[in-house]
Amino acid sequence: MSVYRRIDSLRDYAVNLLMELIRRPAVNPDYGGEGEYEKAMYLYNVIKDWGFDDIKIINAPDPRAKGGVRPNILAYIKGYSNKKLWILTHLDVVPPGDLGAWTVTKPFEPVVKDGKVYGRGAEDNGQAMVSSLIAAKALLDEGLKPSRTVVLAFVSDEEAGSKYGIGYLIEKHPELFSKEDEALVPDYGSSDGSVIEVAEKSILWLRLRIKGVQVHASTPHKGVNPHRVAADYIMAIDRLLKEKYSGRNNLFDPPTTTCEPTIVRNTSTSPNIIPGEHEVVMDCRLLPEHSVDEFLEDLKKVFNEIASKHEKNVEGIRYPQLSIEIIQRSDAPPATPVEAPIVQTLMKALQELRGVKPRVVGIGGGTVAAFFRRLGIPAAVWSTIDDVAHQPNEYAKIDNMVNDAKVMAYLMLNLKP
């Protein structure tokens, strides 16, 4: 088809566009960056004359960011139907990390080498952003009308929870969305492009503070050692997972609920002090069939059982004590049905254009597809990537960028209302 030939002709254009986007750091302010303003304004100036039927810029106020805002750009191509196909990518990136580990190039000085574009944000999410852009440009250049109205959404703040991105759009502009819409979120995938994500686990990050009684390490009987309490507690949580949360869902890998300690801190600064507090951060990923609220209640019950074994009253106060701080919580939305048009059409596209047999999966991580699913909008998460996001020497394969654009164009033209 002419649209696929047009996409092939845009290969060099796509590479240059991706490099220009990488050159404009959009590090999320939560990680000390200036935000997405410069990158968003560059992108707007690139696409404003392409022939989109409408382009909206919706700014979320944020005094930490350059320009005082977090931009969200929505570019529309009217289709035969007013039902929408959303293709959502994100503007923000994570920091470079250890600069000494970047051996191919500096993070924001992109280079092309061996068919790859290197730089921070190349794969996450620049590759998919450019794929969506050249797919849309090919349709516009060829004068082709999509089956549904296409919305290319370039949002802020995906790397830190989406409060200023898709979350802001849903909260402040609910009129933009309809349950008759479908969505593609190209922010997860596999190296052969065969994996389509339709479900996610619930995410629960917890900071558990266990308070004991500080004493000299030579007289442990006079205090309550929160390290020992924490060790017993973590093992009890493991038993809880095996006994009550042992269900399996083979859509996921691993197919179980997990809860892992990741960060440990305490108030001791000397080898001979039993500290008064132990802090441990847990990263829990719950299968969607489990209730997050019930799990939190179970954690409290388990601690009470452990505390009774270590209990001591000091000056009328019972120890040990537990406080639970929720760092992040994202309850799993209903999975996207495999029968949904976005999934079925995507599977057909991969079979016809790639000759691959697609498979549907669930993941433990979170994507912005969850926001669509909570609205009742079917969303598929898919792209062709080597999974080098957030790593030094992050890259995007040029072939993947071009070939994914063809799949997106297929969706634009063939997704039925």
Image (cartoon, rainbow, N blue to C red):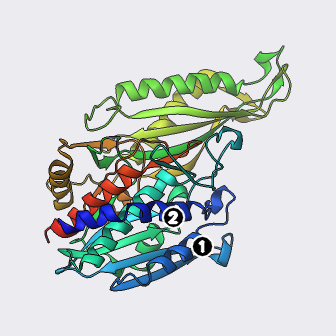
Q: Residues within 10 Å of mark 2 (few under 14, many from 20)?
A: many
Which one is in front, 222 or 190?
190
Task: Tell me if label 2 and label 1 are in contact, CB under 8 Å.
Answer: no
User: Is residue 331 among what the camera can see?
Assistant: no
**Residue at 67%, 61% in the rendered image:** 33
Whole-percent x, y for residue 183 in the image: 29, 64
- Which element is circle 1 on? helix
Whole-percent x, y for residue 50 in the image: 38, 81
**Residue at 25%, 58% in the rendered image:** 407
126 shown above or below 254: below
Residue 6 in which image quadrant = bottom left
Whole-percent x, y for residue 287 in the image: 34, 40
Question: Which residue occupies the extreme top position in the image?
Answer: 218
**Residue at 52%, 27% in the rendered image:** 305
Residue type of the residue flagged with mark 2: Leu
Residue type of the residue flagged with mark 1: Tyr
Q: CA distance from mark 2 to mark 1?
A: 9 Å
Residue to which mark 1 is pinned: 37
Q: Which mark is residue 265?
A: none
Question: Which quadrant: the N terminus?
Answer: bottom left
272 relative position to 198: left or right: right
Residue to which mark 2 is pinned: 91
195 shown above or below 38: above
**Residue at 46%, 56% in the rendered image:** 125
Question: Which quadrant: the C terminus?
Answer: bottom left
Q: Residues within 10 Å of mark 1 (few under 14, many from 20)?
A: many
Which one is in front, 385 or 93?
385
Whole-percent x, y for residue 354 in the image: 21, 47
